[in-house]
Amino acid sequence: MGGVKHFVLRLLLIVAVLAVWEFLVKLTEVPEYILPAPSRIFFAMYNGFRTNVYPQHFFVTLTETLLGFLAGTFLAFLLGTLVALSRRVEYFLYPFIVMFQAMPKVALAPLIIVWFGLGLTSKVINAALVAFFPLMVNTIVGLRSAEEDRINLMRSLAASRSQIFFMLQLPNALPYIFAGLEIAMIFALIGAIVAEFVGAERGLGMLIQSMNFNMDVAGQFSILLILSLLGLCLNGIIVLARRHLLFWEVANTGGDTDNSSQKGGSV
Amino acid sequence: MNEMNGAARAARAVSSVGRDVISVDRLSLTYGKKDTGVLALSDISFSIADGEFISIVGPSGCGKSTLLKILAGLLPPSEGQATLNGTPIKGARRDIGVVFQTPVLFPWRTVLQNVLLPADVQGLEKEKMRKRAMDLVRLVGLEGFENRYPRELSGGMQQRVGIIRALIHDPAILLMDEPFGALDAMTRETMNVELQRIWMDSRKTILFITHSTSEAVYLADRVIVMTARPGKIGDAFKVDLPRPRPLEVMNTEAFGAYVKRIRVALNADGGLD
């Protein structure tokens, strides 16, 4: 696929779907609080930006997501590395890891709001918590995936443990780590939004919630559109970084590393 | 006191002419517990002289690779010991180079960077090593590929990188574990010729493990036969063919006779798998 022709067809299809949607809504006279027409959604979007309401809340959610992502993945990488390098650490942490992995992390959100309040902190912590596991699991799997022959080669050269780690295990784990980061980014966004649902004064999640109370469905749709574009951009950043850092992997981006990404567990 | 030390040193110096570089003394290895485990190597003794090219042939599973791992210091023996220049091998040593069955290249390093890996690990002088690496790259005909990544290379080229990587830190001994086993027959013969040339240029002591009898005869000064379950040393055959040996030597009667005798020795103990 690809090429200008196909790209135009793709755009036309999107326009066609929107047109049919608009037409059907007008024809059937569905009330706007059930399903708004696309034109109403774009109008809501325009209004949101014109009044500067959307940008304010957008930056709050973006900040929460990014801080949560950074905190969560940093800790996940540290702990994952400890577990991967030390069987003893793994042995003692294993019960906790298994329990937390099976638990839906978003279910903790109400508790975290109670503990850390309605402000930024609780959102960052929730986002970090949800982003934590996919990267930790992938870091462990990645660091342990170094082939035995490669380890033997390093050992035969009398390499120290830190040399084996930095020259072999870490670069070897990067495909797994990036697969984990991709999920962690999206998970951080989910974590931030869910925490805003539960209790917040600002943010796009809070905005959706309040629009829902006011039956402003067109507004909710416009926020959903913003959120999916945000998710797309955040994911794109990781994909770009991955392509840049994993230059040796161009032949098989995705593929086997995508399998590893599935080990991240639930939200 | 001083006099005695001097005498001892002199005696050592005399004995070091054509001395043994590696000597393996009643080596055994059991996987698992001593009484219940699997005996992989049993009572292995042999020695390798300085500059000698030794091939070890044996069926798969006879413990050839295990033996090589012990000599590389990757695995401690259960009994007996292996010594290198008189000191027991305990752990990896920097004067040994190992070539594995697969090239074992790091995909994130270029050819040159892969060759320089031992130098990086051992913190050797960068500029000097770089020059040496380029010489080695030229030696095996890989100039022009030094900045390529392994995935851009063919299997034979990759294994050549694996070999010169083992030479970069100038180890006295090269341990090679079926390095050409995964290559096609044509490439394999080319690599054999090349390895002979490298050995004649560098005069390293080489221990070469293979399950190909003709490869063993073609390359070695001495072929040691190993038998399986448990791995034991059988007969040794001295190969008296003039060097450098062209590939055509394989068609000669003398060559055929060596191969035949070694095959018989292998078959006597259960044969090749």
Image: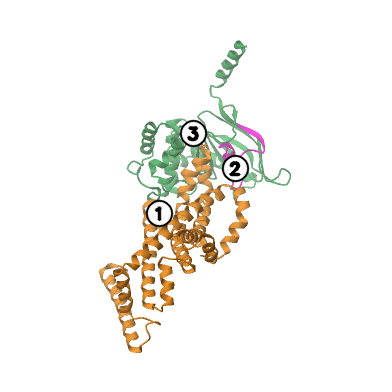
Chain colours: A orange, B green
Residue, disc 1: A249
- The residues bearing labels 2 and 1 have C-alpha atoms spaced at a distance of 33 Å
- In the rendered image, the residue lying farthest to the right is B35
The kind of residue tagged 3 is Leu
**Picture coordinates of residue A140, whole percent (x, y):** 53, 53
Q: On screen, B143 above or below A147?
A: above
Q: On screen, B13 above or below B167?
A: above
Total marks placed: 3
Residue numbers of the magenta segment = B59-82
Comparing B187 with B213, the one in front is B187
Mark 1 vs 3: CB contact within 8 A? no
Q: Is residue A252 left or right of residue B68?
A: left
The kind of residue tagged 1 is Glu
Closer to the eye: label 1 or 3: 1
Judge whether residue B75 is colored magenta.
yes
Closer to the eye: label 2 or 1: 1
Are tags 1 and 3 found on a single chain?
no
Numbered label attached to residue A102: none
Comparing B54 with B256, the one in front is B54
Residue, disc 3: B241
Closer to the eye: label 3 or 2: 2
**Picture coordinates of residue B223, whole percent (x, y):** 56, 37
| Chain designation of label 1 | A
Quadrant position of residue B86: top right
**Picture coordinates of residue B179, whole percent (x, y):** 49, 44
Residue, disc 2: B66
